[in-house]
């Protein structure tokens, strides 16, 4: 299988803080054949783009492709730059924040068949 991010439509979400995050799911798009892995590329805009504190059952890998930021995993904070890779264990609270003047781009990967199999829970959500 071969796919390029330019061949996939952007998806986006606006955080409660007003930051718009965009991503392109490459493997494991909903409606595709099960792949066993879901992966894609996400962009957090400069000027404080962030994905707020959240968790989900499957573990996740981040690999930073461009930009700089801070990733929180549990109670630890990591300064990240191109080449940084993080493993986020299952059900661990985590967040990412762009601290630079350019887009923070990261590759993400989950061990699930489809992106829709990942159920996000955000800190402060009712029922938590």
Image (cartoon, rainbow, N blue to C red):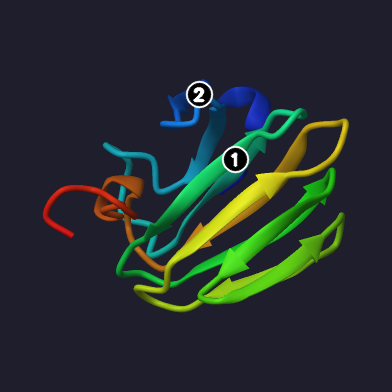
Residue 62 at x, y percent in the picture:
63, 61
Reading the image, the residue beneath label 2 is 18
Can residue 3 be spotted in the picture?
A: no
Residue 28 at x, y percent in the picture:
40, 48
Reading the image, the residue beneath label 1 is 50
Residue 43 at x, y percent in the picture:
66, 35
Q: Residue at x 38, y 65 (%)?
A: 36
Q: In front here: 40 or 73?
A: 73
Structural distance between the alpha carbons of marks 2 and 1: 9 Å
Give the structural element (helix, strand or loop) at label 2: loop
Residue 71, compared with residue 99, is above or below; it is below
Q: Residue at x 30, y 69 (%)?
A: 57
Can residue 48 be spotted in the picture?
A: yes
Left or right of 26, for residue 81: right
Q: In front here: 116 or 84?
A: 84
Left or right of 65, for residue 86: left
- Whether label 2 touches label 1, CB < 8 Å: no
Within 10 Å of the Cα at label 1, are there few (<14), some (14-19), or many (20+) other Cα atoms? Answer: many
Residue 52, compared with residue 72, is above or below; it is above
Left or right of 95, for residue 67: right
Residue 50 at x, y percent in the picture:
59, 40
């Amino acid at each position: 299988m071969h796919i390029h991010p330019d061949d996939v439509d952007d998806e986006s979400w606006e955080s409660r803080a007003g930051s718009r995050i965009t991503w392109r799911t490459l493997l494991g798009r909903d409606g595709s054949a099960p792949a066993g892995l879901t992966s894609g590329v996400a962009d957090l805009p400069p000027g404080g783009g962030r994905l707020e504190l959240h968790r989900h059952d499957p573990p996740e890998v981040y690999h930073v492709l461009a930009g700089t930021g801070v990733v929180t995993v549990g109670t630890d904070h990591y300064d990240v730059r191109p080449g940084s890779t993080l493993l986020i264990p299952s059900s661990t609270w985590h967040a990412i924040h762009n601290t630079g003047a350019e887009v923070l781009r990261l590759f993400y990967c989950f061990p699930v068949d489809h992106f829709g199999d990942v159920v996000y829970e955000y800190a402060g959500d009712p029922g938590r």
